Amino acid sequence: MSTAIQLWALTKKQLQSWSWLKRLLMAIAVLTFSTSSFLFLTPPGTSIRMFLSDTVITTRHRDWAWIFVGAEQRDKMVRQVQAFYDSSAEEKQDFSMINVSGTNPIGPVRPDRTLDELVKVEDISGKYWVGKKLTVYDPTTIRVVTPYKPGEGEKISAMVKRTGAVAGVNGGGFIDPDGLGNGFAPIGLILSGTDIVYTDTEGHIPQLVVGFTDEGTLVIGKYSIVELQEMHVTEAVSFYPRVIANGKPLITEGDGGWGRGPRTAVGQKADGTVEFLVVDGRQTHSIGATLKELQDIMLEDGCINAGFLDGGASSELVYDGNLMTKPSSRYGERRLPSAFLVFDHPDDYVPDEPWNGVTKIDPGGRYDHPDYLREQAELKARQQADQKSNPPKPPATPVQKPETTPSKPANEKPQGGAITPNNDPKAPSKPTGGTTGGASGGTGSGATVPGTAPGTNGATGTGGTTGTAGSNGLPGTTSGAATGAGGQATSPGGNTGSSLPGAGTGTSGTGSVAPGSSGTTGAPSGSAGNVQPPAGNTGTGTTAPTGSTATLPTSGSQPPASSTPGGQSAPGGTTTTPSPVQTNPPASVPSSTVPSGNGGSTGTSAPSTTTPNTGTSSSTIQSNGTAPTIIQSAPVTGQK
């Protein structure tokens, strides 16, 4: 067995031991390496990359062409395309080669012609595309039509219906942000019936145009408005390139440099017959045509001069009120600034001038495109419906173990001035209204001493006297029993509560408290009991009769007697100070964020100002006035 066979067997055995994911990743890596090697290391691969780059350059995504050829080569190709535009327009037309008044296939020109006598629609196709050919027998029936409504373009089907035309195709280019422009920002020139409906260029500056003279001769090239008027051109829009000049093809090698895509072309035969070619593209049924393919078709048909109109998603043909082609836009027909329409009575059409008086032109975009906004609203509604029908499951809440509170030792005595915690979970926790004081004493005898001090709705005291007060912090009067039993407190201005007996008992120590004298009580050795006061603010304080002071053994210190707002000073005793009132700070209001955005498409020219027509005749050129500013202007190739 040869070494190669052994190596293959070992490799196959190794691959079979891999998981399916590992085999898939290996296959992707091998395919990527093989494809990259073919595209970048072989002559056929280089040709494919150049073709793809040409196709991308003619779209609004021109910058992405660097992926195939690099940024430097992309810029070089763009310059070559621009050079071709200019060179193809240099040769002046020989008007003697066109005889519009010559033999016409349908006979002499006359009014009230039938649809078939005016135009003819045929299917055309190539290896990678399908389309339509519109033949116009009388070129003088062709007019440039513009939208009637300021602020947005108009669909060709709407133009045909509104004006009574029999057929129409798209015209000149326009600024098209995001591929969703409103069709109201034309590029270059729009001329209709000798009226300069729109221009963004001075009258003496040449620009690339496609138009017709008053006799019906097709004019394609680079001309200024002055030259067009001298040639009696009455209908014109701006676009490019020219591909047939005086019977000679201008694309002699390559495909024309635009790749494949939707196209709209126009040519004229020697007898004056005009044909429009409209090709679908960027779709499964039709990828699109190259410039050379359409040039060769028109050359075979006998066209003397030919060129291209705006293409891409704008390419479409309407015949007898029906859309005959399939535009590449996902929304169907687009709003356009101009179109070539065919009329039985062309003189009846009066040009609309929607740009008159307009100072700023907004080309539109995704933020105001009605079809796009409707699509987004429907998408959002579907998402909300899906969320309602399939609500997200709440996240699992982790089980928290109850915290164990350590119990106090039996021999621990309560701290003086501290609040005894309430073990009743149902009792609400509320801020204290005064200082708590108290001590447990022994079982010795003691005298009952009336006291007056701020307190709360009941308190507990054992072995001594306890004063209580209402929740409003007003003085209260209470009596305590020296035997350790709780007494009752009545507080003016507050509620009445009863103190509960403490659970702890003293086992040693004796003491007595006499009016007018001071004394001490024995230190208790019993543990403190749980206190369950009624609802309300809780606080206890030791009291003594006026003029005497009782000293109680406590582990905490009492504040000095003082007068503070919200509390009362006990005569001869301690002072109760209420807790300060907390005030919630005002909530801060977050500042709102205003979204902003802009859009634009890429291409060859970027007009920023325009000069609208104000009724200029064919013998004059408007050069005065304020030019409207185009908002969010961006260059466009036109083949969008």
Image (tube, grey):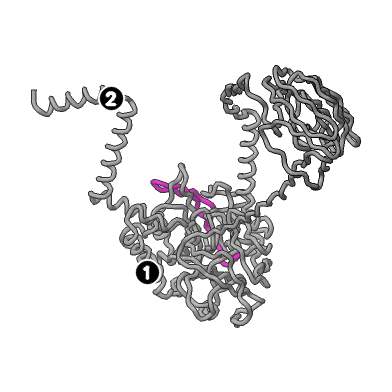
Give yes or no for residue 139 being in the magenta stretch: yes
Tag 1: Cα neighbours inside 10 Å, few (<14), some, or many (≥20)? Answer: few
Q: At which x and y percent is residue 20?
A: 33, 25
Q: Mark 2 or 1 closer to N-term?
A: 2
Q: At which x and y percent is residue 478?
A: 87, 29
588 or 580, which lies in front?
A: 580
Image quadrant in which you'd find residue 455: top right
466 or 280, which lies in front?
A: 466
Mark 2, mark 1: which one is toward the viewer? 2
Separation of marks 2 and 1 at Cα, in angstroms: 56 Å
Image quadrant in which you'd find residue 424: top right
Residue type, mark 2 in image: Trp
Q: Mark 2 highlights which residue? A: 18
CB within 8 Å, label 2 to label 1: no
Relative horizontal placement of residue 199, taking residue 123 as reference (left or right): right
301 or 106, which lies in front?
A: 301
Marking on residue 83: 1
Q: Residue at x 77, y 37 (%)?
A: 434
- Look at the numbered disc 1 and give the secondary structure of its residue: helix
Q: Which residues are magenta?
A: 121-144
